[in-house]
Image: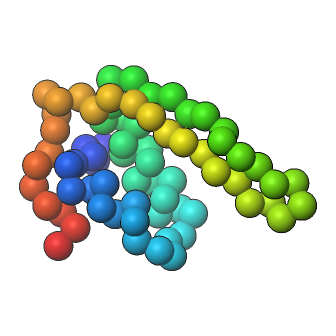
């Protein structure tokens, strides 16, 4: 399993990205966290657009500080 690193947060700002790539990166983040929660902020039934907020705490013992985004 890949560990989510400090510099991986920059990856989320890249657009566009595939749903599969996003799923993998979010999975790495969740499994590298002590806790995580999700809140649906907004959903538009007419357009299908949604906004979801993911919040958690990274497991500092397994924190990867190498920049894998280069």
Residue 51 x/y as whole percent: 64, 51
Going by the picture, which residue comes out furthest to the bottom?
16
Residue pictured at 40% horizontal, 65% vertical: 13
Please state which of residues 44 and 30 is positioned toward the viewer in this rendering. 44
Is residue 69 rendered to the left or right of residue 41?
Answer: left
Q: How many marks?
A: 0
Q: Quadrant of residue 68?
A: bottom left
Q: Quadrant of residue 35?
A: top left
- The C terminus lies in which quarter of the figure? bottom left
Please state which of residues 65 and 3 is positioned toward the viewer in this rendering. 65
Residue pictured at 14% horizontal, 61% vertical: 67
Residue 41 x/y as whole percent: 66, 42
Please state which of residues 28 and 50 is positioned toward the viewer in this rendering. 50
Residue 48 x/y as whole percent: 80, 60
Q: Quadrant of residue 44?
A: bottom right
Q: Is residue 1 above or below residue 9?
A: above
- The N terminus lies in which quarter of the figure? top left
């Amino acid at each position: 399993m890949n560990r989510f690193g400090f510099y991986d947060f920059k990856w989320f700002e890249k657009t566009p990205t595939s749903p599969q790539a996003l799923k993998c990166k979010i999975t790495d983040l969740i499994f590298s966290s002590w806790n995580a929660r999700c809140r649906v902020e907004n959903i538009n039934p007419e357009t299908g657009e949604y906004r979801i907020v993911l919040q958690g705490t990274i497991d500092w013992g397994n924190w990867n500080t190498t920049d894998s985004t280069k």
